[in-house]
Image (cartoon, rainbow, N blue to C red):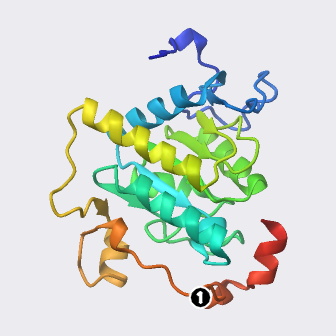
Amino acid sequence: MHETTTDERIIVPGPAGFHPPSAAQLGVLPPNPGKGLLYGREVDEETVMEEIARVMLTGRNATIFPGPLVLWNWNAHAAEKARAVLEIAAQIPDVLIIPMPDYRPKYPKVEPQEVINPNHPNLTIWGNKIEACIFVGVHCHYANLSLKMIRAGTNCCTIALCAEQGHEDAMMTVRDCDAAKLRSVAQVIKRVREEMGIALPENGENVRFTPYQSRMVHGGKTHTNPLDFTLSDPTDGSAAAFGHSSNQMQREA
């Protein structure tokens, strides 16, 4: 197991203050294939996955933030990655899932227990007292924006599971995350969880709803089993309410 000391860590939870230097300014670059970033240092990606597991299993109000690339059932690839994200969620007791369904600013007010928005992600972090989170399925430029703002203004430990080259402004990142690699993350979390002696609920209902989600969507229910979720048909569906079409998403993916 690789352990970084405080002196070795470059990108760490904040708050780093107003307009802190970017990771690139601090000399941190995206990882090479087969590698990941652990607090700004390049290490083997499985080492990063193990630290992701420990942080998500012990962090206060650990949360997964799925973005449009895994939220909307645009095609078979998106659906397969979405299932893999749910498998990750299934290994983390009491985890929250708060979506990033759209990138446009939510003015005059965002409901932090309903969504996270890349233009003011700190509001959702603060509103739910989140100290560990995973970004997955978010277009890279919006993920970069969110990660910088979260590091500047919160104490949240950020994790980016990226389909491209990874995110140097996250405390931890794994690159080239297709469905198979996301499932590898889930398996590592399962192994580390068992090594730590952390059990899942017997009924499998380990995903916790925010009070808003519970009240407005789920009739007062507090938890659910993520593996019971059924994907809808690959149509535009509710994404149309956010001004998107499947053709637009396929061009951007």
Establish if 43 lies above or below 181.
Answer: above
Query: In the figure, is residue 6 to the left or right of 206?
Result: right
Q: Position of residue 98 (x, y in %)?
A: 47, 64
Q: Answer few, some or many: residues within 10 Å of disc 1's Cα (few below 14, many 20 plus, some between 14 and 19).
A: few
Q: Position of residue 19 (x, y in %)?
A: 74, 37
User: 211 and 242: which one is in front?
Assistant: 242
Establish if 67 lies above or below 40.
Answer: below
| Residue 31 position by quadrant | top right
Query: In the figure, is residue 88 to the left or right of 137?
Result: left
The residue sitting at 50% across, 44% down in the picture is 184
| Element carrying mark 1 | helix
Q: Is residue 56 visible?
A: no
Establish if 16 lies above or below 83.
Answer: above
Q: Position of residue 187 (x, y in %)?
A: 41, 43
The residue sitting at 72% across, 72% down in the picture is 104
Q: Position of residue 213 (x, y in %)?
A: 37, 75
Instruction: Report how many numbered discs are placed on residues in the image.
Output: 1
Establish if 24 lies above or below 6.
Answer: below
The residue sitting at 47% across, 71% down in the picture is 114
Residue labelled with disc 1: 238
User: 22 and 167: which one is in front?
Assistant: 167
Q: Is residue 155 visible?
A: yes
Q: Residue furthest left?
A: 202
The residue sitting at 67% across, 83% down in the picture is 242
| Residue 25 position by quadrant | top right
Query: In the figure, is residue 104 to the left or right of 252?
Result: left
Q: Quadrant of the C terminus?
A: bottom right
Q: Quadrant of the N terminus?
A: top left
The residue type indicated by label 1 comes to Ser
